Each structure stands twice: as structure tokens, then as C-alpha cells.
Image (tube, grey):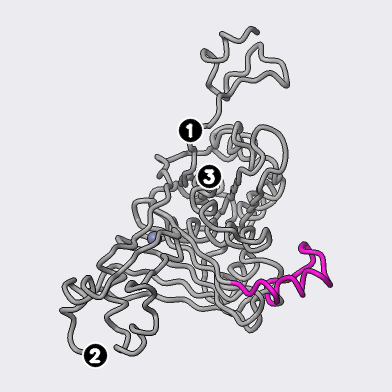
Amino acid sequence: MNENNEQTNQNPNDQTGVQEGEKILSFPLPDDSHVMTFDLERANLRGRIIRMGRVLNDIFDPHDYPPIVADKLAETLTMAVLLSSMLKYDGIFILQIQGSGPITRLVADVSSDGKIRATAGYDADALNSLLAVKPANEIKMNELLQNGYLAFTVDQGSHTDRYQGIVELRGHSVRESIDHYFAQSEQIATALRLAVSKNTAGDTAGMWRAGAIMLQHVPDHADIPQDAKPIAENWLRAQILLETCRDDELLDPKLHDETLLYRLFHEEHVRIYPATPLSKACRCTTDKLRKILSLLSDDDRTHAMVDGAITMTCEFCNKQFSFTDVDLMTGEGAKEPDIS
Ligand SMILES: [Zn+2]
């Protein structure tokens, strides 16, 4: 194939006549980050598949997270998208992990229209001390976030209830803690495969990928025809098929959802639904930060002022906001009820 053919063969599924190692994709790739619902009609199960690519770099690149922190945050964000996709809501889904270890918090939120953001808090010295005595892949979640817990919240605005679930952190991963949550508090049986990775070599060095597939047993789902086979048998068969899914399959940007699902579940009659694209969007605004500043006492505000201005950085997107005394007095925040 000559150079001119590169532009005419951009469909990663169309590999006819393409030899391994030939360059068939142009970079940067369009972002393919999305979450999609599917049914396994024969097994009477509902599933979700998530693939994330450039959106992870969009979120992580403004920060300088240590690798183990970024890795746990990618996992948190993937789980947040998965969990949010299981719910019907109109607002923001927030997954928050807090603890008192080297990592102090991992937060990811997902709006009902697929806007995502995430942030992490950590103590660099404590993290380095831990990594000096133990390889990263042997460190458990409860060592990273001591006395940690995981909470999720659905915020549908000020006039609706916030739904919240809380579970103690355990095991090696965010995923294990969530497995524990489902086992403990839900009747819905859930099976999950999840992988996150940052590429270290080749054309995509430095690029993050994440992928996950979750299956749920939904016996009463009206849209899914009931099968004559016993429920337990269906569930076991689908779980075994899901377990055959490899990390490199979940993470491969050239392996489309349809191909992967067919590869795993072709005997289960896969029905797919339209995907929801995922993109980075922060909700920070000048007004929101001004309101936070207005909650400080005069003394604290004066203390925070450097060269006549207070600078605040959004912990999610790293954007900086600067407020002078005049801004604070004339902005909306100054009109809040007197709280000093
Ligand atoms: Zn922001």
C-alpha cells in the first residue's frame, strides 16, 4: 500500500488487504469515548460496554498525578460511568472515594448527557514512602486510602432527593469495593471486566485507554424476552463468556464494540442500543468560586490575598480564577446573605 492509500482506509474494521504493521490510522484519532447498553437476549441479561480514550488525557493532562494515582482515578472514572449508566436520572452522578492514606480522595462525576470530570487528592511524601517498600501492583486500595469508604450520590437539582450509597473500601481496586457493594446491598447480580492502561510505547505513547463490560441479571425486564432455560444457567454461561474477555481486547481502540461483543457473546443474541458519547466538561464558573470565597471570613479572605487578588484553581480542570477585592464586593457572591 502506498502513502496515498492512508486516507482511503480509515475504517479500523476494514482490514481487507492490510498487512500487520501497516499504518492505517491517522493521528490524532477522533475520540471514541462512549458508553453503550446492550442486551443478551438468550441469556436474558442487560449489559454495558464502555471504551474511553482521549477524554482520559483531556482530564489527566492538566494535572501531574503520580502514575498510581492516575491509574486509580481512571478506574474510578470508568466505574462512575458504568454505575451512572445503570440509573435513570437527570443531573449529576458522583462517585467519591475518601480515605486518610497516601491517596486522600478520588472523585469522578458524570452528567446524564455524558459530560465527565475527575479529580484526585494525595500526599506525595506518604505515597513515595509506600512505593519505596512495595511495588505499585501489590498495593491494596485500603493501603492507599486508609479507613476509606466509597460513596455515590445522584444530584438531580435542589428540588429532588439525593440518593446515596456508601460502602467500606476493600481489596485491591475500586472494582472490588463496588463488587462488595453489589453483593451486600443489591439483589441485582452483577459481573464485570474492567481494564485501564496508559500506553508507554509506539505512536500512542502517553495515551490513556479504559474499557469495561458489565453484565446484570434483570429478571423482570420487560424489553428482554424471557428464556425457557433456568436463570442460574444463563447467568453462569454469560459470566464464563465475560471472563474470557482479555484486557487487551477491552483496551484496543481498533476493536469496535460490535466486534468484541460478537466475539464474546455471539450465541447469546446481542442487541445493541445507541451509544452515549463521553466528553470532558467541567462545571466550574466564576460565580460558583466567588460564592465559595464569600463564605470565608474577612480575615481568611485577607490572608488568602496575594498582590491584591485571591487566586483559586479548579481542582477538576486546573483552570485558574483570580478575584480582586472589587470583584468580590461587586460580584454576585457579595450579595449572598451575611455569613461573617
Ligand atoms: Zn473546572
Residue 324 place in picture, x, y as percent: 28, 71
Q: Secondary structure at mark 3?
A: strand
Instruction: Identify which amino acid the numbered label 3 is placed on.
Output: Leu
Q: Are marks 3 and 2 in contact (CB under 8 Å)?
A: no
| Precedes in sequence: disc 1 or disc 3 | 1
Instruction: Identify which amino acid the numbered label 1 is placed on.
Output: Pro
Q: From the viewer's perspective, is residue 18 above or below residue 113?
A: above
| Precedes in sequence: disc 3 or disc 2 | 3
Q: From the viewer's perspective, is residue 266 above or below residue 89?
A: above
Mark 3 highlights which residue? 40
Which portion, as a residue range, is magenta?
122-142
247 or 9, nearer to the observer = 9
Quadrant for residue 189, please give it.
bottom right
Residue 190 place in picture, x, y as percent: 57, 61
Label 1, label 3: how far apart the Cα atoms are: 29 Å
Mark 1 highlights which residue? 30
Within the magenta stretch, is there residue 7?
A: no
Q: Residue furthest right?
A: 133
Label 3, label 2: how far apart the Cα atoms are: 56 Å
Quadrant for residue 184, please give it.
bottom right
Label 1, label 2: how far apart the Cα atoms are: 48 Å
Instruction: Identify which amino acid the numbered label 2 is placed on.
Output: Ile
Q: From the viewer's perspective, is residue 281 above or below residue 270?
A: below
Q: Confirm if mark 3 falls within 8 A of ligand 1.
A: no
Q: Is residue 142 left or right of residue 231?
A: right
The residue carrying pointer 3 sits among few (fewer than 14), some (14 to 19) or many (20 or more) residues within 10 Å by Cα, namely many
Task: Tell me the number on the disc at residue 185.
Answer: none
> Which residue: 19% across, 78% down?
334
Task: Specify the quadrant that holds the C terminus.
Answer: bottom left
Task: Tell me the number on the disc at residue 339.
Answer: 2
